[in-house]
Image (cartoon, rainbow, N blue to C red):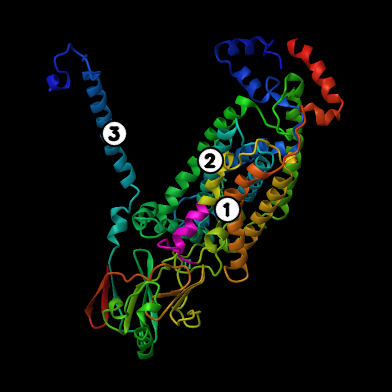
Amino acid sequence: MADTANPGAGPGHSGDGETRRDFLYLTAAAMGVVGTAAVAWPIIDSMNPAADVRALASIVVDLSPVEEGMAITVIWRGNPVFVRHRTAAEIETARGVALDDLPDPETDEARVQKPQWLVMVGICTHLGCIPKGQRVGEEKGEYDGWFCPCHGSHYDTSGRIRKGPAPRNLDVPPYEFLDDTTIEIG
Amino acid sequence: MSEFKPTNPVIRWIEHRLPIFSFIDHAVGSGYPTPRNLNYWWNYGSLAGIALVILIITGIVLAMQYTPHADYAFDSVERIMRDVNYGWLLRYIHMNGASFFFIVVYIHLFRGLYYGSYKEPRELLWMIGVTLLLLMMATAFTGYVLPWGQLSYWAARVITNMFTAFPFGETIVTWLWGGYTVGNPTLNRFYAFHYLLPFVIVGVVFMHIWALHRFGSSNPVGIEADGPQDKIPFHPYYTVKDLFGLGVYLTLFAALVFFAPNMLGETINYVEADPLVTPAHIVPEWYFLPYYAILRSVTFDIWFLSAKLIGVILMFGSTLILFLVPWLDRSPVRSARFRPWYKWFFWIWVFDVAVLTWVGANLPVPPYLYIGQVASVWYFFHFLVILPLLSIFEPTKPLPSSIGEPVLKGGGASAAGAASKPMEKA
Ligand code: HEM
Ligand code: FES
């Protein structure tokens, strides 16, 4: 090893300018970088969600009291999740839209597990406001779904962005039906 | 501007071992030679320093009463307002002190733009100043979250969400929040940063002054001093002038604190944060309105870039572009006094910023939206196109031959010049 780093020369010296010392500088610097990164990571990662925060990651919701045309908001991981029991008319409008008309093309079928139950994270994909449209009497926007007042994003009855600055449709969280009217989110 | 020679034996003893008194004398005393023609626009630097000290002192005592927990923060601020002795006063000074700090620093910055203070050899001084502005913004933003009112909460959410415009945005934002939304972990770390950053600012202020003293202050005519006859000692001439300015400043500040403490704030921040209800109208503090207007002006995608990403980039870019000003403006003349065209464009730009402030306070619907779009375009056009073009085409006026000339009116120049020669040698 020492020989290859320093062929045929006296200690710490060689004809072409490369020395054992250069090698030591390089390895010391490399170890320094690795060491610093190893110490930096715990500091950085400590700012990520802690175990108790992560533990709140799934909830069970009973949908039986939610009648057709009604909507409820539940809290999942500190964020609102919109559950709307859609009417036949709402489903029909959502399915009648041509994909070309959508900024973020996605079929309604791909966004629901059962057509009458629309489950979405109720956070505008623009800058995180809570869109209006869950409660009776609130403005629902031009597409009769949800309207985000912060910077004017309009979502349709499938929660897809139709107009305004939001780039994506409202997110669908991971969930599954435990039985006909119970879901587990997360 | 003689050498510093203390007579007091105690001071001499200390000075010999730690030359701190001469250091102070060189910084703000009789040992700091200053151009003799500085006008009142040169008061704002020292005012900013005092505004910072006021914020730090009131902040530290507020911190003794404040509870950084999502469940208690709002109530602890209400307690400061109602129960703590003079709590209302301390909080109103801190709140409005932040506003005044921004007013002073913005004027300070506009002064720099008007008189070309950023030019050779003060580019780095200018860039340190822009860094200070960025640090102030971060401090004010984290501070505004602490009272945990509706706007505290939603401003934090909207602003942190901007990072989702970048690749790995969700990961970054979750990390910033320490959760899946703005919550208690977020409040805690914002408090830690809000306590830390002002002291970082103090450190950077020292670098700012260090760089300033390398070449000394520029001045309203923008030519370098010819010799000692163009300079006067900082103390007592400018210490007195700065103190007078401070008196005016404190009078206005007291008027605001005592008679209209909530004028610059939003009432809805006296409603406790509710993660499930977005206020109908989210507005930032007034000093962030122009940036907010630029952010919201981008309503269309360009190419593969989303409107959201472009808006965020332009918003940050509007401040970052200031770093480049020394190289965008290549005109050899510093002061706008001798730049007949730039003078106009400067005021148009100031007006443009005022328009953006007004637009930022309104909902992004026509006509505000369109006005905001025009004003945003002009903001960047000014820096990226007007400044470089003026550097080439503007016919500048002749510069006076010395700092003394405009004061001594014409004939005085040569007389002063001649008289200065022997003085310089003396
Ligand atoms: C660069 C200097 C500073 C700026 C620009 C600044 C700005 C702000 C702002 C805008 C608020 C919100 C006021 C409100 O609406 O209630 C605030 C609150 C607060 N700040 Fe500062 N601050 C600064 C320095 C400090 C320092 C050095 C401390 C002490 C460690 C501090 C401690 C606090 C506390 C405890 C609050 C919450 C209480 C309250 O809301 O009044 N600040 N700050
Ligand atoms: S956050 Fe909803 S439109 Fe901006």
* Residue A156 lies within the magenta run: no
Left or right: A99, with B423 as reference point: left
User: For the point 50% across and 66% down, which residue is it?
Assistant: B299
Front residue of B343 and B48: B343
Report, in whole angstroms, how far the alpha carbon at label 1 lies from the one at label 2: 19 Å
Left or right: B381, with B159 as reference point: right
Q: Residues within 10 Å of mark 1 (few under 14, many from 20)?
A: some
User: For the point 54% across and 47% down, which residue is it?
Assistant: B321
- Magenta part of the protein: which range? B300-316
Q: How crowded is mark 2: few (under 14 residues within 10 Å), some or many (20 or more)?
A: many
Up/down of A125 relative to B389, above or below: below
Circle 2 residue: B131
Residue B116: image quadrant is: top right
Quadrant housing the C terminus of chain B = top right
User: For the point 35% across and 58% down, which residue is it?
Assistant: B170
Quadrant housing the N terminus of chain B = top right
Tell me where residue A153 appears, x and y as whole percent: 47, 72
Up/down of A36 relative to B273, above or below: above
Q: How crowded is mark 3: few (under 14 residues within 10 Å), some or many (20 or more)?
A: few
Circle 1 residue: B380
Residue A70: image quadrant is: bottom left
Up/down of B9 relative to A24, above or below: above
Report, in whole angstroms, how far the alpha carbon at label 2 lies from the one at label 3: 27 Å
Circle 3 residue: A33
Question: Label 1 is found on which chain of the structure?
Answer: B
Circle 3 or circle 1, nearest the eye: 1
Q: Judging from the image, what secondary structure is the residue with disc 1 in?
A: helix
* Residue B305 lies within the magenta run: yes
Q: Judging from the image, what secondary structure is the residue with disc 2 in?
A: helix
Residue type (three-letter) at the residue carrying disc 3: Val
